[in-house]
Image: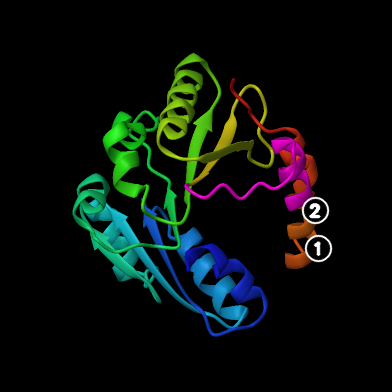
Amino acid sequence: GHRDSAEEVEEGHSKYLSFLHLGFGGGSLPRYMNHSVRARGANCRNVAVEIDTGVVKAAEEYNLDDGMELVAGDALAYCRSSEEVFDAIFVDVFDERNLTPAGFYSGSFLESVSKHAMVIHNLHTGGNVRSQILYHTIYSYRRVFQTVFVVAAWGSRHTGGNAIVLAMNKRRLDATSEALSWREAGKNAQARWNVDFDIPFRTSNRLWLS
C-alpha cells in the first residue's frame, strides 16, 4: 500500500512510486524526485500539469520535461477527472500576483485530492493577504484530512518566505504529544536519508494554528 512506500524505497526494494505535480514552473522538483527516487533503486513516474502553454512549449523545446509526463491543462480540472491514485501530490501554483488561487484551497479541490497518499502544498508567506490565504488553506485542509502539518521552509522570515503544508488521511503519530512525534520523526528521517539540514530544528519552528 501507499503507507509503506518510503520504507520500501529505503530498504532497496523495486518499488514503483508515482507523483503528481500541479504547476511545472522550471521543472526542478519533478526532476529532483525522478533522480532521487531512482537513485534509491525504485521506479518513478512523475506527471506534471501546467496551465501556461508558454511554459509547456519552453519545457519541450529545452528538454526540461525529460523523464516525466507534462500535461498542458487546468490542474483543478485534471484532479476532478483523474481516477489515478498517486503516492504524493505536490501543489505549487501561484497567480500573477504571486498568490495561491482560491481554487487550490477550496473544499472541492481538497476532496478531489484526499484519496492520494499525501499532499504537499507550497505557499508564499509575508503580508496580510498571504497570511490570510495561509490560514484559510490550513483550515480547509484540516476539515478534509486527518493529519495536517505546517512548517516554515528553509530561510523563511516573518517578512516573507514559504510555508509547506503536508496532509494525509492516515493517523501515523504514535507518541502522546503530536509535536514530539514530529520531532522524533524528523530525527529518524535525518539519520535515515542523510539530509543536510536540521529537520528537528525546522519542525520546532512549525506554524501551528489552533
Q: From which residue to which does the magenta span run? A: 169-185
Q: Mark 1 points at which residue?
A: 191
In-front residue for pair 87/24:
87
In-front residue for pair 17/142:
142
- Amino acid type indicated by mark 2: Lys
> To which quarter of the image does residue 36 belong?
bottom right
Residue 210 lies, in percent from the top left, at: 59, 20
* Residue beneath the point at 73% across and 66% down: 193
Circles 2 and 1, Cβ within 8 Å, touching? The answer is yes
Task: Residue 184: say if magenta.
Answer: yes
Q: Name the residue under label 2.
A: 187
Alpha carbon separation for disc pair 2 and 1: 6 Å
Q: How many numbered marks have been drawn onto this rendered protein structure? A: 2
Say if residue 51 shows up in the picture: no
Relative horizontal placement of residue 3, taking residue 173 as reference (left or right): left
> To which quarter of the image does residue 96 belong?
top left
Relative horizontal placement of residue 40, taking residue 183 as reference (left or right): left
* Residue beneath the point at 59% across and 84% down: 13
In-front residue for pair 178/154:
178
